[in-house]
Each structure stands twice: as structure tokens, then as C-alpha cells.
Image: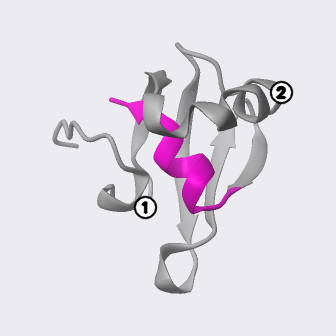
Amino acid sequence: MEEILSTYLTELPIGFKGYIVGYDKIFGGYQGKLLSMGLSPGTEFILVCQASNNWPLIIEVDGNLLKLYKPEADALCIE
């Protein structure tokens, strides 16, 4: 699979495996919620599903499926 670098989950193909590298300062209010979901820097994820109009997104982290809505997904900086 070719390497894709992006800051937005919606730009990634289903099945993409990436890492969380931080949080967007604009959406900083979501950092606590994301941390409580286990989405800390260094966490590996797989993009499992994009529902209609791209929301919600579903990612897999450590065998668990997590549903993310636009503000949560946009707050993640990924690679």
C-alpha cells in the first residue's frame, strides 16, 4: 500500500492504517474526549468505514471500533 500523509481522516481510503501524532489546536476542546477514547499520540488505527456524507467515521483501535463525528475526527493530526 502506498504511503499517504494527511491531517484529515476523510481523505484516507478505507483500510488505511495510520498513527495519531497530535491534536489540531483549533479543535483543542476535543482533546480530553479523544484521550478518554484512547486516542493518544502514537496510537495506531485502521479506518474501517465512512458512512454517508463521510460522517460518522469508524476506526479500529486495539480491536475496538470507535465512531468519530466531524469535530472529533478533524481534531486528530494523523500520519
Location of residue 34 by image quarter: top right
Magenta stretch holds residue 9: no
Q: Is residue 26 visible?
A: yes
Q: Nearer the viewer, mark 1 or mark 2?
A: 2
Q: Locate residue 29, reporting x and y percent.
A: 66, 35
Q: Is residue 78 left or right of residue 59?
A: left
Q: Locate residue 10, reporting x and y percent.
A: 39, 61
Q: Marks 1 and 2: CB-CB under 8 Å?
A: no
Residue bounds of the magenta highlight? 68-79
Q: Locate residue 27, reporting x and y percent.
A: 53, 39
Q: Quick one: which residue is furthest to the top in this view?
A: 42
Q: Is residue 24 visible?
A: no
Say how many tags the image has: 2
Q: Mark 1 to mark 2: distance in Å? A: 24 Å
Q: Secondary structure at mark 2?
A: helix
Q: Quick one: which residue is furthest to the left in this view?
A: 2
Q: Quadrant of the C terminus?
A: top left
Q: Which residue is mark 1?
A: 14
10 Å crowding of disc 2: few (<14), some (14-19), many (20+)? few
**Near-viewer residue (21 or 32):** 32
Q: Quick one: which residue is furthest to the bottom in this view?
A: 52
Residue ID at (45%, 25%): 19
Label 2 sits on what residue type? Ser
Label 1 sits on what residue type? Ile
Q: Locate residue 57, reporting x and y percent.
A: 59, 62
Q: Is residue 46 above or below residue 62?
A: below
Residue ID at (76%, 26%): 32
Q: Which residue is mark 2?
A: 36
**Near-viewer residue (18 or 69):** 69
